[in-house]
Amino acid sequence: MRRLTRAPNIAIAALWVDALLQAGIPASMQRYFLGAAAGELPPDQCLPEVWISDDAQEAQARELLHALQNVPQRRWLCACGETVEGGFEACWQCGRPMPA
């Protein structure tokens, strides 16, 4: 068993573990409830951790996590002249939908 990474919060850790499991990489979350001890313990020691069961799959798991953490963001220019970034499918300036 090997620690793959620390997650910023439980929700992100759960998403990463689920993505690894979906990819066929046995994974688990550790330090699930340790966040309640932050203050008594150093905060960086209370973050949830993602662990994998098979050390041979470490490279594949790290590659998958890197892809999840570095998703390219969309950027498109609306007819009104506003640049729309991220996952938005409608312009926040005028409300027009993203062109096909």
Image (spheres, rainbow, N blue to C red):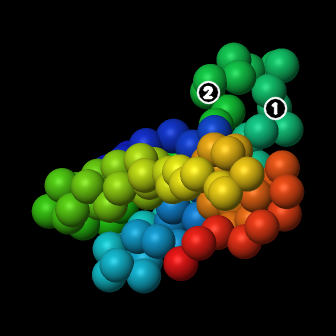
Give the residue type at disc 2: Gln
Residue drawn at x 14%, y 62% as measured from the top left: 56
**Percent x, y of residue 20:** 41, 70
Q: Which residue lies furthest to the left in this view?
A: 56
Q: Residues within 10 Å of mark 2 (few under 14, many from 20)?
A: some
Looking at the image, can residue 12 be seen? no
Left or right of 97, for residue 53: left
Q: Quadrant of residue 13?
A: bottom right
Looking at the image, which residue is at 47% across and 71% down? 19
Q: Is residue 46 left or right of residue 28?
A: right
Report the amino acid beneath label 1.
Ala
How far apart, in angstroms, are the residues tagged by discs 2 and 1? 9 Å
Tell me the element at label 1.
helix
**Residue 62: percent from the left, percent from the top?**
29, 52
In the image, is residue 95 above or below residue 38?
A: below
- Foreground pick, 53 / 97: 97
Q: Is residue 89 left or right of residue 30?
A: right
- Label drawn at residue 45: 2
